[in-house]
Image (spheres, helix red, strand yellow):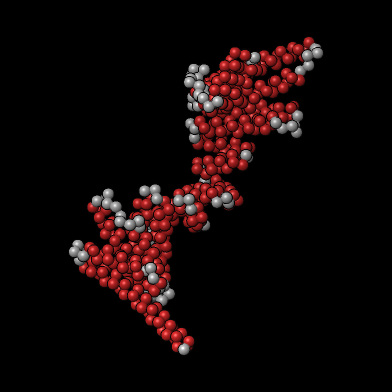
Amino acid sequence: MKKVLFSLLGILFFIGTAQAQDDAVKLSKSAGKALAAYNQDPAGNGSKLVEAKTKIDQALQTPEAQALASAWLIKGDVYSTRIQNEMAMQQVNPNAKLTDDNDALEAFNAYKTAYEKPEAKKYEKEQAIDGIVAVQPLVINVGVGKYTAKEYEKAFFAFKASLEAHEILKASKKKSVLDDPKEYTDQVFFTGLLASLAKRCNDAVTFYEMLYNKGTDSVAVYEGLYNCKVELKDEAGALKILQEGRKKFPEEGSLLFAEINYYISKGRLNELTGSLEQAIKKEPGNASLYRALGDVYNNLFTALLEDSTQTKEKKGPKMKEYADLAKTNFKIAIEKEPNNVDFNYSLGALLYNETNLIAQEMNATSFSTAAGQKRYQELKIEMLKDVDEALKYFQKAESIDPNDTSILAALIQAYGRKEEDELYLVFKKRLDVVKGGGKNASSYFKN
């Protein structure tokens, strides 16, 4: 009895499976017939295209239809027809919107699936290739539209599909819109660029490296590849690309500035000076470059100042050199942008830090002799003169931004060193206002 029941269940399962397969085939064929009816009379049978889409979408929800190359071909034809109609409408009315997100990509993927089915018949593969020929330019057009709308990920998938289409057509000895080598190279680059804009650096690297490995002459490829490798934390790979790019394109500003940023991030100050000097030659009007170079020399000065392994006599000449170079570059930056608060504060801070050296020598000077007392007074006069020089830039900075705590603190220190108690208290109160969450209504010094 059990054997009989199991036999009956097996028969029912077979009948059910066969029925499902039959229904899926019928549904996809019905979609094909609806599309044919539409093509016979597009104006009179508009609803047939809607019917075709509904039925093929339903059919392809089943494993049975998914296994059929013919079903995927019908989907490709339905979606290709829809996108061709809508793009034709956009020729008449540029403001016309596409009904769905990307019918061109849906059509291509359907044709590609049909083409790749191992059981697809020869004529089905040929139909798939013909469909890809028709839909490839449409995929590119949609991708351009997605890029314009700043939908970078969708644009990337469209451009990626256009390259996949090219490879299929090339293998089939069919004409591709990317047959021209320059058109193809441009499409590969823009696909990588779109991937990077979409924050898909793993994908971007794939396309950039296609061009890099062929020995590209495009600095943009090196820049894109470097930026993505940085994003992916591939420091060794990024540095390799940067060094190769700087050697290959020594005059290109984009890689030069990438190198500057790299050196800044690594604190490689001695190497940074050369890159910044080269950048200044390219952009002599760029005040920020002079400020950056001033910062580098200022940092080198500070590093030597804090270096306890060298004697004052040994490091003194180099410290003076770095300080003078920093001042020179800060002053040029201020000449170009007189009202830049950061430039003025930076120069003031450097000048004030130099007075600390004089203060240290004053503290070490002995009062036990007349010569020592005389030397102390000479140093004090020199120090106060330098404090006044620093104050000019602190005052200018305060006139631009009266609520910057660093500027207010610098003014407090400077007036404290000058023993000008009244102004010391003025700026202490102004700093307390800002620290308490308030704002000074206006600057103390006038610009």
Name which residue lies at 26% across and 69% down.
34
Residue 225 relative to residue 47: left or right: right
Residue 301 in view of the camera: yes
Name which residue lies at 57% across and 22% down.
432
Q: Is 336 drawn above or below residue 389 in the view shown?
A: below
For this orientation, the residue located farthest to the top is: 370
Towards the viewer: 318 or 309 = 309
Name which residue lies at 45% across and 51% down.
198
Q: Is 8 drawn above or below residue 30 in the view shown?
A: below
Residue 250 in view of the camera: no
Q: Quadrant of residue 278?
A: top right
Count of numbered tags: 0
Q: Quadrant of residue 425?
A: top right
Q: Which x, y percent locates residue 363?
A: 74, 19
For this orientation, the residue located farthest to the right is: 368
Towards the viewer: 359 or 426 = 426
Towards the viewer: 402 or 400 = 402
Name which residue lies at 65% across and 23% down.
354
Q: Which x, y percent locates residue 142?
A: 35, 55
Residue 161 relative to residue 321: left or right: left
Q: Is 270 drawn above or below residue 410 in the view shown?
A: below
Q: Which x, y percent locates residue 130?
A: 33, 68
For this orientation, the residue located farthest to the front is: 1
Q: Which x, y percent locates residue 137?
A: 34, 59
Q: Is 121 drawn above or below residue 52 in the view shown?
A: below
